[in-house]
Image (cartoon, rainbow, N blue to C red):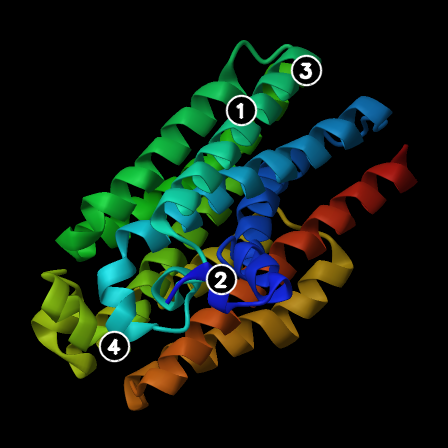
Amino acid sequence: MTTTQFSRKEIVLAYVKILRLVNGLVSGVAAAFGVVLSFPDGIILTTADYVSVALVVVAGMFVSCQAMIFNDIADREEDAINAPHRPIPMGKISVKAAKIYGYIFVGLALGTALAIDIYRNLYGLSVATVIIFGGSLVLYDFKLKKLGFWGNLTIGINVLALFLYGSLHTFIVYQKGFAWIPIVVGVAAGAGNVGREIIKGLPDIEGDRAAGIRTLAVKFGPQKTAIIASSFLWILISGGFTAMILGLNYLASEIVGYILILPIATFISIRILINQKPKWAYTTKEILLILYLVFLLLFIVDKIIFLAIRG
């Protein structure tokens, strides 16, 4: 197929779809979570704080977007089997156009990171993070993904790095002690993302095997893979629970966390042991993404309200 066979609206939607904006929002919010949860109690938030948090979210989104684009370029052969509806296999976006599109987002991510560093005097922290984070994701897309579990682990480490960046960002700005609670959440989120990546391999066994990608699902089959994935989800649940007990003492977030988020995550970790069918695996990975986003946003908003009231 060629792009001339599709309407302008279909092409535009394809360029939006390939970005997987929810993933990008989660990445940006994860970094912002580290920034906001590290704010020292008792400070009065200024316009500079709000602007820098917004820029951090945007930078994280841009890095994720470029990674999603290059992921689809790298996966175009297996996607022709596993996900033929995606823009590149369908012919809505050519490989050449996708590469240009990806490089545009690389530039946007670096530009935004540079703006953050200049605005908050961060000595290149944001730019370095974008280079390391973005570079490792592209390396994952083209090389590490084929290693299966070790590629999954790379994603988990990158997720942790986002939370670490947020804590370092605020520490450099305020010089009032390094906040460790975001790191606890980051470890939990990183483990949860490893579990999510393992689950993503369940529906793609046929295409991944043909492409020589050694996912745990290809190596061990659905049942054993589900057990391994579930164990990482339990680390996510335990870490989230621990973080709420130790330091995330904000009423609205704790209520939602205890009665909604953690129970749903627990259900998913058990359900995947029973059902590894492609439809449920896809559903699981999407639910986990939404849970991450809701959890992080709730605590960001709660912390900002807490500081505003105390201020």
> What is the C-alpha distance between the residues marked 1 and 2?
48 Å
- Mark 3 lies on residue: 120
- Kind of residue sitting beneath label 3: Arg
Say if 171 sits above or below 139 in the image: above
Q: Earlier in the sequence, mark 1 or mark 3?
A: 3
Whether label 1 touches label 3, CB < 8 Å = no
Q: Which circle, 1 or 2, is nearer the viewer?
A: 2
Element type at mark 1:
helix
Q: Nearer the viewer, residue 108 or 259?
A: 108
Other residues around mark 2 within 10 Å, as few (<14) / some (14–19) / many (≥20) = few
- Kind of residue sitting beneath label 4: Ala
Which residue is drawn at the image coordinates 19% and 83% (left, top)? Answer: 223
Other residues around mark 1 within 10 Å, as few (<14) / some (14–19) / many (≥20) = many
- Kind of residue sitting beneath label 2: Thr
Element type at mark 4:
helix
- Mark 4 lies on residue: 226
> What is the C-alpha distance between the residues marked 3 and 2?
46 Å
Q: Nearer the viewer, residue 246 or 17?
A: 17
Which residue is drawn at the image coordinates 69% and 69% (left, top)? Answer: 256
The tag on residue 168 is: 1
Say if 302 sits above or below 11 in the image: above
